[in-house]
Image (cartoon, rainbow, N blue to C red):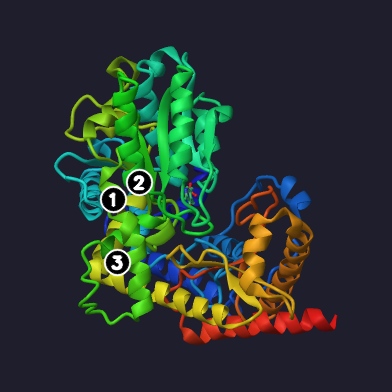
Amino acid sequence: MPCAYRPVLDKIRQAFPQPVSDRVHDSYFVHSIMRALDEVDALKSELPLLGQTSETDYEAARVASLEEKGVSLEEVTSRLVSYLRGMTIFGHPRTQQNVIQQPSIPSLIGGLLASLYNPNIAWDEYSRRVALAEVEVSAMTARLVGYDPGRAAGLFTFGGTGTTLYGVKMGLEKACPGTMTEGVRESAVLFASDAAHYCKYNVAGWLGLGTRNVVLVPTTPSNEMDLRELGRLARAALAEGRRIAAFVVTLGTTDAFGLDDLAGVVALRDTLVEEFRLPYRPHVHADAVIGWAWAVFNDYDIEANTLGFQRRTVRALAGACRRVRHLHLADSLGVDFHKTGFAPYVSSLILVRAQDDFHLLNRSPEQMPYLYHFGDYRPGMFTLETSRGGNGVLSALANLRLFGKEGLRVTLGHMVEMAQLLREHLEGHAATTVLNRDNFGTVTVFRVYPPGVDTFSVKHRELEDVGWRDSLLRHNEYNRRVYDYIHREAMAGRGVALSLTDCYRRTSYGEPVVGLKSFILSPFVDAEHVEDLVRQVLAAQVQIANS
Ligand SMILES: *Cc1c(COP(=O)(O)O)cnc(C)c1O
């Protein structure tokens, strides 16, 4: 009987990179990728979207089933490309929605190479020099933030959330030794500001600390942790006999780029150790997934300003570095190359100042009988993950090499310059006011008011005076209408796509403040896009007045 399956197998073999060099097949491989890129390119227009958005039919998706027969590689490609229809082009200069980037070409090639040969950086036996790349990126980043690269160590993990999970887990082991084997038996708390990312709750929940044991520290109007309140809350917790699993300090909050006073928190921690004679040193984790990149300016000569930034940009950079330069004081910190490093998802690095801290997470070798018998690099002995791909590592390394310190300074500096330009325009109009004026990133949260409102005083009154609640709520609604207008226009190819934040912060009397948010993260943004946005905001005002 002839081998009936053979023709199918032959076809499937064609769909794999060939194990032995075959130039003809290589070009088929490259051509297949080009075909996919061509099809995507055909979706581009003036809009900051690929193709058009359309109704999504989740009901139909829910009844999908595996077909009896497969289809050709070409057909698979076209079908895959169809899933990109309606996607926002995050690198488009008319997209200023959120902290999402367009990955650079080298970072994509890094990701492709890792996908192609599938290194597993759990163990150098399975990843060889890609494991080395993880060590290199960790050392480069450690040095950048001021850690001693000889003592520090780093690991790539599953997102910024993962970096905080690692930080708090190490802190928990310090505060309550043995939780890895015995579980959490004592009451332990985690401190983070009310502007810190919500992953603090995931982390507390998943580690068994419990979300109720997240102590929210109020923030000042500059969106940074109120240190005096932190001291009061921490002393109260210790006086009740609770342990401190971690202080999570945010350098670069998601909505406003608020920067906590890390040096102040570390000093407080040291004081508390003495004051309460603690048998452990509470762990300080810096959530710097957004702010880490500003470390390239730590040694930029602000006075000489050889890159020729505007003075107000230089001031903004200095304002951020004032806090970012203390990153080396944190026991651990998180870096997202997919947030402010132009790498594709997921590319997150957890760095520890002292590599021994990772060994708080060790498992016993008997639990992993089939792995790690030899080799020089075996992070799989203590990582949460088992398999870890090399994509994040190679794409981060690609960008660190591509940009160098200078390239990162230029790109970030330009984006800050554009954000400053936007602020100048917004502050220059009677109808608009910047909410996060004291935060110096590339994100601007602002509010628009109807004609005739005195924007000089209304911002503070609405934030602090309960007598102004009605005004606040009315203007919250007004800003939603401005957002709706801007969004409709952007989807029609006019102006810039922004986002809306439902709660920039709470007023002193507990109501949320709605704001419009411009997150500039595209290297392609120029003054014309900023001016378009301002025109569009003013047009929204006129349109609402006439409706
Ligand atoms: C985005 C973000 C996170 C979560 O990071 P992921 O990579 O999305 O898991 C944590 N902290 C801050 C400040 C963030 O902006």
Q: Is residue 407 left or right of residue 55?
A: left
Is the shortest distance between ligand 1 and the CB of mark 3 under 8 Å? Answer: no
Q: Earlier in the sequence, mark 1 or mark 3?
A: 3
Residue 131 x %, y %: 24, 44
Q: Quadrant of the C terminus?
A: bottom right
Q: Is residue 18 left or right of residue 186?
A: left
Amino acid on which the number 1 mark rests in the picture: His
* Real-space Cα separation, disc 1 to disc 2, in angstroms: 6 Å
Q: Residue at x 78, y 82 (%)?
A: 543
Amino acid on which the number 3 mark rests in the picture: Arg
Q: Quadrant of residue 308?
A: bottom left
Q: Earlier in the sequence, mark 2 or mark 3?
A: 3
- Badge 1 marks a residue whose secondary structure is loop
Which numbered disc covers residue 398?
Answer: none
**Front in this rendered view, residue 454 or 191:** 454
**Front in this rendered view, residue 462 or 324:** 462
Residue 87 x %, y %: 60, 66
Q: Which residue is mark 1?
A: 326
Which numbered disc covers residue 23?
Answer: 3
Q: Residues within 10 Å of mark 3 (few under 14, many from 20)?
A: few
- Mark 1 and mark 2 in contact? Answer it, CB < 8 Å: yes
Residue 370 higher or lower than 303, as above or below? above
Is the shortest distance between ligand 1 and the CB of mark 1 under 8 Å? Answer: no
* Real-space Cα separation, disc 1 to disc 3, in angstroms: 52 Å
- Badge 2 marks a residue whose secondary structure is helix
Q: Which residue is mark 2?
A: 262
Q: Earlier in the sequence, mark 1 or mark 2?
A: 2
Residue 126 higher or lower than 499, as above or below? above
Residue 410 x %, y %: 31, 74
Q: Residues within 10 Å of mark 2 (few under 14, many from 20)?
A: many
Residue 338 higher or lower than 219, as above or below? below
Q: Residue at x 21, y 43 (%)?
A: 128
